[in-house]
Amino acid sequence: MTGSTRRNFLKEAGAGMAALSIGAGPLQASVMPGRPSNETSSSQDRPSNIMAIAAHPGDAFFAMGAPVALATHQGGKGSLLSLSLGEKGSATILPAQYGEAQREAAQKAAALIGAEALFFQYPDGEVPVSDEAKFAVCDLIRQYKPDIIVTHWRGSWHKDHQACYDIVQDAVFYAALPGLVRKLPAHSVGKLFFDDNWEDAAGFVPDTYLDITPVFERWMDACAVFPMWRGETGFRYNDYYGSLAVARGCVCNFRKAVALMSPPEQRVRHVRAL
Ligand SMILES: [Zn+2]
């Protein structure tokens, strides 16, 4: 993303951020330099429209589903796009059969959290970083008009996750370009966040903690629909993401939370002199 459109995107991204205030009084111990912030804002200012974009259905629901569930719980909209069905994820079930099981699970899980499951069918393990894929995601962004997108962080050992990161970066850029004529008009995504995914942990530094306490059980129930949730394919997603929500909640004083990471440019604050 370069040039004036990138600047427009940054302006949009920063528009919703709370102003940084600098108090004149002495610093409290809890806000001393180097200590984590205790600043808390509300997510209920207005309902959001959130789109999760993941390489595989499991990623969409396990690592990105809670913010989507929170958006629908608060009266907003949610959608979860999987670029692949993750059909090669089982060592015992044939890809065609497993892919359909994944699709059915995603549809059922989406219904449980009041969201919509969307699918592309790029081959699992071979998600292409192509303009065709980027424009396809761009078109869905223009159709669903999300305020917020949650997707993979690039620091992943899984090539499909890296591909998804690259695709989404350019799809957000394409979607916002008025001069890029597609079937639907341009749409600027307000904010982009990266998910807290066990496979995308290299360099993941969270800066946003979201209170998911009201939707935790519903989100867990939705995840449990998936055939891999309880460790059937070798990783105990239920234990990992369930306990991660507790651990993340501890550091921000919420009962349950998910951590998100902003793109560096989205963290920029402009502080006007008084
Ligand atoms: Zn994945």
Image (cartoon, helix red, strand yellow):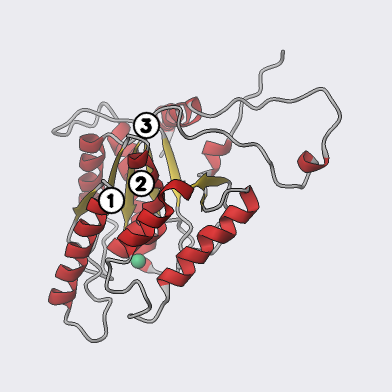
Q: Residue at x 20, y 40 (%)?
A: 139
For disc 2, the marked residue is 68
Q: Quadrant of residue 228?
A: bottom left
The quarter of the picture where the N terminus appears is: top left
Ligand 1 neighbours mark 1 (CB distance < 8 Å): no
User: What's under tag 2, amino acid-wise?
Assistant: Val
Q: 123 and 68: which one is in front?
A: 68
Report whether 61 appears left or right of 274.
left
Q: Residue at x 56, y 52 (%)?
A: 255
Label drawn at residue 50: none
Q: How many residues crowd mark 2 within 10 Å: few (<14), some (14–19), many (20+)?
A: many
Q: Secondary structure at mark 3?
A: loop
User: What's under tag 3, amino acid-wise?
Assistant: Pro
Q: Residue at x 62, y 48 (%)?
A: 252
For disc 1, the marked residue is 80
Q: Quadrant of residue 123?
A: bottom left
Sequence-earlier tag: 3 or 2:
3
